[in-house]
Image (spheres, rainbow, N blue to C red):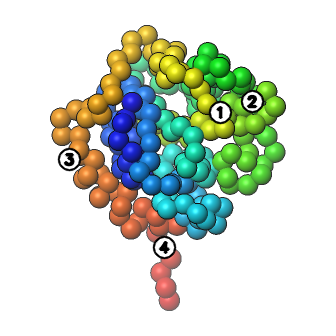
Amino acid sequence: MDPVPRRGYDNMATDELLLRRQEAWLRIYGWAKPAVSYGYFDTKAVASKIFPDAVEYIRRWTGGGIVDHRHGITYTLTLPAPPKEASPYPPASRLYAWIHGALAHALRQSGVECILLQEDAPDAGRACWASPVTSDIVSPAGQKLAGAGQRRHRGAVLHQGLIQQCSPGPGWERIFSERLSQVVELTNSFTPWFGYETELAELCNAKYLAPDWEDETHGRRKPRQS
């Protein structure tokens, strides 16, 4: 439980630092400013057009659509790379369904009626909540309650998720954690290891605050001007 509302890119850098660790982490956190995040292959221009009233627009390292973080609960799950002799994680679609199955169980246990969507809803644009996809969590009436973006890096998994349009009761976080892992250790003081704050500042400045992070060519070489 991260008690510190952070700048948008501090949140993104924290998630990446957790991904580098050899432990699995579930982090539930807030935002210092009204924020909208957009998937790795989206653009700030599109995000600001859909949600013009946000203060921060943050490009995520994960995929997925454009997400309004001014409402709801944000969480990140990181799974470390398996040992070399172990099997890799299941395909993204199965892993997404497993994580959301655990979350749906926690939401139901805390008083929220919900189901896993069995197929993609009709495409309604880049706003994430307008177009639920397979294994997103929806209300019985079809209203989207939870979605996420994923990325794999050197065998590890980063899953960035959001819960909206519902109010889970107390203790849902613990239920979610215990559905994912046989052993859970809870921390409310988020200085997870010695040197974390220094690593956070260095990564944020070197990557997430660098001008090329929001380059709309997404890192591809720009054509030379004749």
Three-letter code, disc 2: Ser
Instruction: Please name the amino acid that badge 3 sits on.
Output: Thr
For the residues labelled 2 and 4, say whether their Cβ atoms are less than 8 Å apart.
no
Q: Which of marks 2 and 4 is nearer the N terminus?
A: 2
Label 4 vs 3, first from the N-terminus: 3
The residue sitting at 49% across, 85% down in the picture is 225
| CA neighbours of label 3 inside 10 A, class few (<14), some (14 to 19), many (20+) | few
Circle 1/circle 2 CB separation < 8 Å? yes
Report whether 14 appears left or right of 101: left
Which mark is first along the chain, 3 or 1?
Answer: 1
Q: Please identify the residue farthest to the top as the structure is shown.
A: 182
Could one spot residue 218 in this view of the protein? no
Q: Dot 3 corresponds to which residue?
A: 198
Question: x%, y% of residue 196?
Answer: 23, 40
- Please identify, in this view, whether the residue under mark 2 or under mark 4 is nearer the observer: 2
Q: Gap between marks 4 and 3, in whole Å?
A: 33 Å
Report helix, strand or loop for mark 3: helix
Q: Can residue 44 be seen in this view?
A: yes
Sequence-earlier tag: 4 or 1: 1
Q: What residue type is labelled 4?
A: Lys
Do the residues under discs 1 and 3 have CB atoms within 8 angstroms?
A: no
- Check disc 2 and report its element: helix, strand or loop: loop
- Residue identified by numbered label 4: 222
| Residue type marked 1 | Cys
Mark 1 → mark 2, Cα distance in angstroms: 9 Å
The residue wearing badge 2 is 139
| Residue at image point 67% right, 23% down | 112
Residue placed under numbered mark 1 in the picture: 166
